[in-house]
Amino acid sequence: MKDQFLQYLTHERHYSALTVLSYERDLRAFEDFFTHIEGQLSWESVDSDIIRAWMESMMDKGHKATSINRRLSAVRSFYHFALSRGLVERDPSHGIAGPKRSKPLPKFVREQELNRLFDEIPWTDDFTDVRARTILLTLYSTGIRLAELIGLEDGSVDVRARQLKVIGKRNKQRIVPFGTELADALEHYLEVRNSEVPSRSMAFFTSKDGKPLTRWQVGYEVNKHLKRVSTQQHLSPHVLRHSFATSMVNHDAQIESVRRLLGHESMGTTEIYTHTTFEQLKKVYNQAHPRAN
């Protein structure tokens, strides 16, 4: 029966030899499992509990969710074929859900590294340097998205009230507060910009010719300057958004407040930063506790 299925994949579905071999390996892995449990078991007599037990054994052995789901998919395909050809009376894989894939934790730049970037590393008073530092400080101090930063206009930035008016996803507007340091940086940027770029668009952050900055330009500046303090491979504006949220949670901000500042609709989206904090706690524990290792 298994050979019939593999022939079907080859001659009717025209799968590549490599893909068919992958199916064969996954099916053989399941067959080895259920015959090891009980020699009398066959493809026709396997039930849902056996498939679940197989999945649990793979999880116990440390297999990733992607690997387990791939193998489960092969078993599902096999039984779908066998049922359609009358080779089995029922499909024991029907209704069985695979393990959920764990979401990767968000990448962020450590607080100490960002402190070094803003407080210790020298910056010139050149327009591009002032603009770059202000952009990085804005992203880290407010957690706004790249699109929200590019969409800022002069009227969106209230330095006296220390707040930004941003347009988020689905054109939802929100007010984001900021502190004294960013207020001073924004005022200094405005002085330099107004002096060196007298004719410009309505955009708050502009190029030397007065045009609004593109996503690529902002991304390039962020990556270039974060590399001065971080060895991470992927350094983007969104990493600074993650850094903002992680710093807020690490300094005891309520998760609901962080959600509102970030403009998340779902609390679940924001809660991932509590996992990031927990990963940090585990790292500190493993490094500090004498019995951790």
Image (cartoon, helix red, strand yellow):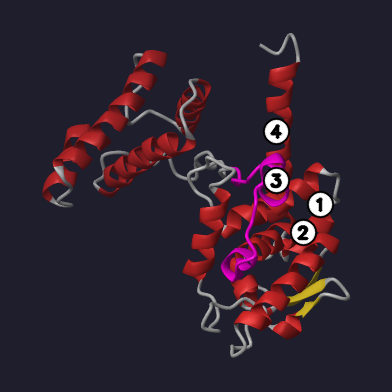
Residue 283, x across and y down, in percent: 68, 26
Disc 4 or 2, which lies upstream in sequence? Answer: 2
Q: Which residues are magenta?
A: 105-131
Secondary element at image label 2: helix
Type of residue at label 3?
Answer: Glu
Q: Nearer the viewer, residue 74 or 264?
A: 264
Marks 2 and 1 close (CB-CB < 8 Å): yes
Q: CA distance from mark 1 to mark 3?
A: 31 Å
Q: Please identify the quarter of the rendering in which residue 196 is found.
A: bottom right
Viewer-nearest of discs 4 and 2: 4
Q: Would you say residue 1 is visible in this rendering?
A: no
Identify which residue, 192 or 212, lies in the foreground.
192
Q: Which residue is mark 3?
A: 120
**What amino acid is at disc 1?**
Ile
In the image, 210 versus 239, the foreground residue is: 210
Depth check, mark 4 against mark 3: the one in front is 3
Check if residue 149 falls in the magenta segment.
no
Find the distance from the CA under tag 1 to the CA under tag 4.
17 Å
Disc 3 crowd rating (10 Å Cα; few below 14, some 14-19, many 20+) is: few
Label 4 close to label 2 by CB (< 8 Å):
no
Q: Label 1: state its secondary structure.
A: helix
Res 280 label: 4
Q: For the residues carrying marks 2 and 3, which lies nearer the camera in this image?
A: 3
In 3D space, how far apart are the residues under numbered discs 2 and 3 (Cα atoms)? 31 Å
Q: Residue furthest left?
A: 11
What is the quadrant of the C terminus in the image? Answer: top right
Residue under numbered circle 1: 255
* Residue tagged 2: 259
Whether 5 is drawn above or below 122: the answer is above
Q: CA distance from mark 4 to mark 2?
A: 20 Å
The reply, left or right, for residue 136 in relation to residue 23 is: right
